Image: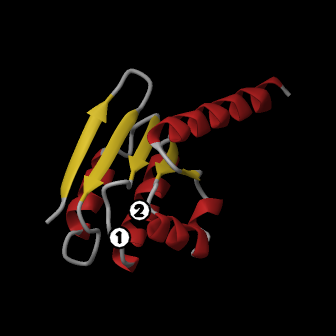
Amino acid sequence: MLEIEVTEEPTHTLCRPVGELDAYTVGQFREALTGLATARRLVIDLSAVPFMDSAGLGALIGGIRRTRENNGDVSVACGRPTLTRLLHTTGFDRIVPVVDDVAAALAALADVDTDTDADIED
């Protein structure tokens, strides 16, 4: 079973799936990320996901793509070593910041905003 907690904050939206992300639960996760595709700053917290298979990874990548298509920024918080290893091995961390916790994910989003501001000034 999968639960998805979504919190709207003034500076960001937090999506926190709780449970396994696999072929049986991926539809619910994909639907949640589709609903969040217009978020300006989205943090996906995977700290309560003990297992994720390729279906979950695909849904995660699709959600990030949709958010970016809407000019949003995304970062991922994941303090689980096995899941972090999966994200690094697959190269996922080259498309979005993957950090240990939500505070670091917010800092990574702030860095993206700063980089964007610098690009505008050039």
Q: Which residue is mark 2?
A: 60
Residue 96 left/right relative to 80? right
Residue identified by numbered label 1: 56
Residue at (26, 68) in percent of width and height:
20
Q: CA distance from mark 2 to mark 1?
A: 6 Å
Q: Residue at x 45, y 47 (%)?
A: 67
Vertical position of residue 19 compared to residue 32: above or below: below
**Quadrant of the rendering where the N terminus is positioned:** bottom left
Q: Are marks 2 and 1 in contact (CB under 8 Å)?
A: yes
Point out residue 16 in the picture as x, y percentages from the top left corner: 31, 48
Residue at image x 36%, y 39%? 14
Q: 10 Å neighbourhood of mark 2: few (<14), some, or many (≥20)?
A: some
Q: Position of residue 94 (x, y in %)?
A: 65, 61
Asked if residue 112 is positioned above or below residue 61 in the image, the reply reads above
Quadrant for residue 15, please give it: top left
Instruction: Tell me the kind of residue under disc 2.
Output: Leu
Q: Position of residue 63 (x, y in %)?
A: 40, 56
Q: Is residue 103 left or right of residue 53?
A: right
- Numbered label tally: 2
Q: Position of residue 28 (x, y in %)?
A: 20, 61
Task: Classify 10 Å Cα crowding around label 1: few (below 14), some (14-19), many (20 and above).
Answer: many
Left or right: 71, with 114 as reference point: left
Quarter of the image with the C terminus is: top right
* Residue at point 57%, 75% (across, down): 90
The disc placed on residue 97 is none
- Secondary structure beneath label 1: helix
The amino acid beneath tag 1 is Gly
Mark 2 secondary-structure assignment? helix
Q: Nearer the viewer, residue 39 or 2?
A: 2
